[in-house]
Image (cartoon, rainbow, N blue to C red):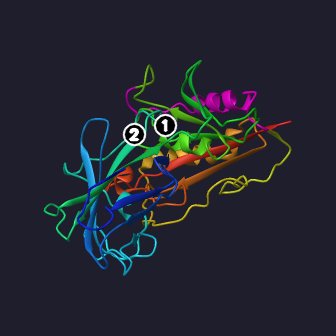
Amino acid sequence: MQAFTTRNRVAPTVILEPAGGCLCDQPVHIAVRGLAPEQPVTLRAALRDEKGARFRAHARYRADAAGELDLARAPALGGSFAGLEPMGLLWAMEPDRPHWRLVKRDVQTPFVVELEVLDGHEPDGGRLLARAVHERHFMAPGVRRVPVHEGRVRGTLFLPAGIGPFPGIIDLFGVGGGLLEYRASLLAGKGFAVMALAYYNYDDLPKSMDIIHLEYFEEAVTYLLNHPQVRMTTTGRVSSMPERPPNACRPMGRRSPRSSATQRQATILSLLTSPCVRLPCTTWRVVLSSGEGSPGPMPWPRWMLGSNSRLFSTIIWMEKRR
């Protein structure tokens, strides 16, 4: 972090906890010290995506009588959001380019967020008082990323730290194709063995989803069930929501109303959940969530969701039969 000298008093300093960085689904405590009593300031946050597009947010605050500003206690007075929003500078970031959605492709590198403190309530005209850099990571320490190219199955397996075995998850995204790993990599940090599964428009898979062969998903399930680090179990109860391990995070935050998926998606999902599929596992659960869901103790930022994203995504949780 960097502070800028002011006359006759300690220079303002940005305090971040945890310092330096943390996982993208974890909260960060933001505070500023060394301000004048009740000084008006503007806080700005910005990052650039992997294609160089910039996302940013700002909020106006007023320091307390001791010259300190704690975002966990001080409400924003306006800007990109208002009210008590300790993580507002992150979830409220929006792109400079209209209709641009930030997508994290390389989960092995973090997003780097620049935080600035400006004097006054002008987001583009105030004097710079302090600056700090915060990294938002997608892989917890010890998580292993293993590319999957087995038979027809294409994807990436993320294994938690430790020797296992672990509960297994297959993570599917909806319309758009390709392979997105950011959700799977974060879930692996909660103690799951997670395979991000591509099923079209990736590698040598079909370029479109005009025809979906359900045998492909069965092959992916079989691959994960046979993996030595996926947990064996004798449980047989089927639920519409997964049971979380003790160290998993409870979803919370904003949610948007669900909308119906496309007819093709609905067909795929209904077939996947049908008992006629007869996949070789005792327990497997399908979770349907809208694009506005939250995987951790903070809401997904708007730029990770996309303002028009209302399509369903699917998580299949499976455990082997003994």
Instruction: Pick whichever, 229 or 112, lies toward us.
Output: 112
Q: Quadrant of residue 175?
A: top left
Contact (Cβ within 8 Å) of mark 1 with mark 2: yes
How many labels were placed on the picture? 2
Q: Which residue is mark 1?
A: 181
Q: Is residue 212 left or right of residue 79?
A: right
Estimate the x, y position of residue 39 in percent, counting from the top left. Answer: 27, 75
Label 1, secondary structure: give it. Answer: loop
Q: Quadrant of the C terminus?
A: top right
**Residue furthest out toward the bottom:** 65
User: Does 230 appear in magenta?
Assistant: yes
Residue type (three-letter) at the residue carrying disc 1: Glu
Residue type (three-letter) at the residue carrying disc 2: Lys
What's drawn in magenta, residue-wise? Answer: 207-231
Residue that appears at 38% across and 31% down: 208
Estimate the x, y position of residue 106 in percent, counting from the top left. Answer: 42, 33
Label 2, secondary structure: give it. Answer: loop
CA neighbours of label 1 inside 10 A, class few (<14), some (14 to 19), many (20+):
many
Estimate the x, y position of residue 80 in percent, counting from the top left. Answer: 27, 66
Instruction: Pick whichever, 56 or 3, lies toward us.
Output: 3
Q: Which residue is mark 2?
A: 104
User: Does 305 appear in magenta?
Assistant: no
Tell me, yes or no, if residue 9 can be seen here.
yes
Estimate the x, y position of residue 178 in percent, counting from the top left. Answer: 41, 32
Q: Quadrant of residue 48?
A: top left
Tell me, yes or no, if residue 23 can be seen here.
no
